Amino acid sequence: MKITRRGLMTGTTGLAAGAVVGAAAGVATERSGDSTGVASYPFRGAHQQGILTPVQDRLHFAAFDVTTTDRAALVRLLQDWTEAAERMVAGGSAGPVGPVEGDDRLPPDDTGEAIGLPASRLTLTFGFGPGLFSDADGEDRFGLADRRPKALRPLPHFASDAIDEARSGGDLCVQACADDPQVAVHAIRNLARIGMGTVAVRWSQLGFGRTSSTSRSQATPRNLFGFKDGTASVKSEERDAIEEFVWVAPGDDPRAEWLAGGSYLAARRINMRIETWDRQSLRTQEELVGRTKSSGAPLSGGDEFDEMDLEMPGRDGPVVPVDSHVAVVHPDNNGGVRMLRRGYNFVDGSDVLGGMDSGLFFVAFVRDPDTHFIPLQSAMAKQDALMEYLKFTGSALFAVPPGVRPGEFVGQALFA
């Protein structure tokens, strides 16, 4: 059953609609990993939505600069965003009144492009960037500097990076995922509208066609190179791995206990050299990736999810080349670490040379970027043969607070 904003706003079945949302949320909880029939996901809980949630098809990611110096104004923004987000993920409007129900002499409190659309499994995930704690000169902007997580700082420059600062960083971020791009865009647009005067959009990215799975119930999707992507990503059913690699645990960082139950979000905009890739033979493509293009199985044999044999001899060395992508990033070569990925394809038209401005918007959630992300990214930048076909053009790191409990706003523990 679909829940529409029209149904919620007309009030014809307000209580009934709420009951349906609650029922749907219950289904989501009970059937974690199976999105079939789920209309919406609960906004409040121990962890933020949009991390373990089965990945939706569309993305609108936005990073914001905080333009105020008033701590109280920042808190009010987070309170307002929390209230708006809870309404929108349930299929309601951004404001309490609605896009057409208020005084026609005043601007509506919702922009209206989602009228009649269902919740579309919208999830909204919020993160805090390093700049929220202190500016480039080290000034404590909001009395939060001594609570900055030790691992929260701009990601280092990696070999072969060609970072565009206009597509990087940010004091706050919001990841909006949904099955309908208009629902995701509506959410970011309204959060930006609500934040006018307190925040300004620094950069944003639209994505389509998820490039990873967060549940075993989802098939592994393909990236713009035509290969299955994210086969080894941590899945929501792997409870022990989730605790080990995704959630920040109490005691991980004594000065940032407020982050326990949260995570870190690493974002990397990766342009793919599509035209050059398309001229490579199938054998070369598979040797660069280390998997078959047809099934995603490792070149050492078996099926997609079978363990690969990195030592199996081939004609000129291991059958899975040591500089192939899967060999370089394999946990066995990186201290056993894994990450939970939620990447998306993007195509932003053509570049100045007439090539496709396209690639992968990589998003990963990790427990500690210093040990779970940066070393692996460094190894990839230096050793991965696939780097010849990639160019990293955007980069950002955010601390993702734990879930929003009843009566709380996003990140409330940070300001306590």
Image (cartoon, rainbow, N blue to C red):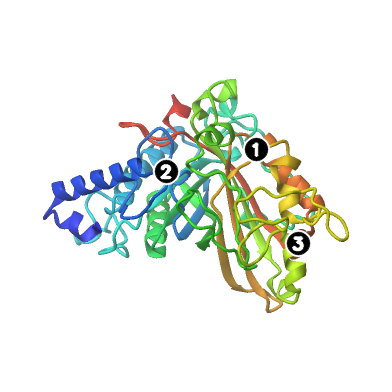
Q: Where is residue 198 in the image (x, y as percent from the top left)?
A: 45, 45
Task: Specify whether residue 363 is in view.
Answer: yes
- Front residue of 262/26: it is 26
> Which label number is shown at residue 49?
2
Q: Which of marks 2 and 3 is nearer the N terminus?
A: 2
Q: Which of marks 1 and 2 is nearer the N terminus?
A: 2
Marks 3 and 1 in Cβ contact (< 8 Å): no
- From what the image shows, is residue 314 above or below residue 372? below
| Distance in Å between CA atoms under marks 3 and 1 | 26 Å
Task: Specify whether residue 157 is in view.
Answer: no
Amino acid tagged 3: Leu
Q: Where is residue 269 in the image (x, y as percent from the top left)?
A: 63, 57
Q: What element carries label 1?
A: helix
Find the residue positioned furthest to the left.
12
Q: Is residue 76 left or right of residue 315?
A: left
Q: Which residue is drawn at 51% across and 27% down?
A: 260
Q: What element carries label 3?
A: helix
Nearest to the eye among marks 3 and 1: give it. 3
Where's the C terminus, which quadrant? top left
Q: What element carries label 2?
A: loop
| Distance in Å between CA atoms under marks 2 and 3 | 35 Å
Residue matched to label 3: 288
Residue matched to label 1: 369
